[in-house]
Structures are given as structure tokens and as C-alpha cells.
Image (spheres, rainbow, N blue to C red):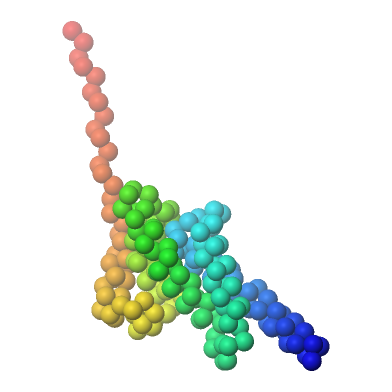
Amino acid sequence: MRDRQASRDARRAREFEAFVAGAAGRLLHAATLLTAETGDDNPRAQRLLTSSLAKTYASWDRLRGEDPYDCARKDLAVRFAHGTWPRLHRRRRAGGGGGGVLGGLSPQERLILVLRLFEGVGEEQVAALLGLPMERVRAVHTRAMGLVLHPPRGPAPAPPLRKAAST
């Protein structure tokens, strides 16, 4: 009996390791885009990914034909939306922002844009995952795309100071 359990545990660990080897890079990239950190310095994205992978591993035996990548991605998005989203939104309003192309977007805009464009998740699925009306997802996606493609300009530079004429 113990041998059978040990064999099952070893198989489960090998399957999960193979999944992580194939999926962790892409999931980390998605998490990095969500947190608007850089690829070199992304501790929040790494924590988000680690939590999502831990939950995926804990439910590995219950997946029963479900795509583990889809489950991990959903958990990543939900954790970001429910945990990170409010904190980042407060920080953004207080003047702190992330970097990169997506750094100027709100956390909700980043989440929807990453799910729709980077992950290829359908509009209906994003709406269901986030508990938002499809029209809201469409509007946020359109606004985020506009901001990424045509970022607002900063303030105009101050004109150079003229030297006073000497008399």
C-alpha cells in the first residue's frame, strides 16, 4: 500500500515538474506584465506566480482533464485582481507607478489587456472570470489599447531662459 502511494506521489511530482518546466516562463511573463515590473526585477510577479503554482499543485489530482495552464492562469488573474489590484490602484493614485509600456495603465486595464492580448482569452471568458459585464471588458480593453498605442504626452518642456541684455 505504501509503495503504491509513494509511486503515485512520485508520478504526481514528475507530472507537475514537467508542467512547470513548460509553463512557468510564460506565466511569469504574464505576471510581470500584470505587476508592471521589469523582467530583471519582478519580486511581486514571482510571489504571484509562486502562489498560483502552489494552488495548482494542491489541486493537481482534482483537475480531471482540465488544462492545468488554464487553471494556473485563472488563479493568477484572480489573485492579481483581488489582492494586488487594490494595492496597486492606491499606489498609482498616490503617484507610484510601474514601468514599461503597460506601466501607465490601471491594474484593471493591464489585467484585461494581458488576458485578451498576451494570453488570448476570449472576451466572454474574461468577463466571467472577473465578474464584469462583457461591455465593460470591451470598453476597458478598447481604452487600454488606445493608451498603449497612443500614450498621452507629458507636459511641454519649459522654454529656455533668456539672458538679460547687459547695459
Rendered location of residue 104, percent (x, y): 35, 56
Q: Which residue lies furthest to the front in this view?
A: 1
Residue closest to the eye, 71 or 30: 71
Answer with left or right where residue 57 lies relative to residue 2: left
Residue closest to the eye, 138 or 129: 129
Q: In which quarter of the image is residue 166?
A: top left
| Residue plotted at (54% across, 85% down) | 67
Residue closest to the eye, 51 or 164: 51
Q: Which residue lies furthest to the right in this view?
A: 3
> Which quadrant of the rendered structure holds the N terminus?
bottom right
Rendered location of residue 29, percent (x, y): 52, 66
> Which quadrant of the rendered structure holds the C terminus?
top left
Question: In the figure, 163 relative to 20: above or below?
Answer: above
**Residue 18 seen in render:** no
Q: Quadrant of residue 56?
A: bottom right
| Residue plotted at (57% across, 67% down) | 50
Labels in figure, total: 0
Residue closest to the eye, 39 or 132: 132
| Residue plotted at (31% across, 53% down) | 93
**Residue 125 seen in render:** yes
Q: Quadrant of residue 152?
A: bottom left
Rendered location of residue 97, percent (x, y): 38, 52
Question: In the figure, 96 relative to 166: above or below?
Answer: below
| Residue plotted at (44% across, 58% down) | 36
Question: In the figure, 28 relative to 22: above or below?
Answer: above
Question: In the figure, 125 relative to 97: above or below?
Answer: below
Answer with left or right where residue 84 lies relative to residue 64: left
Rendered location of residue 59, percent (x, y): 58, 82
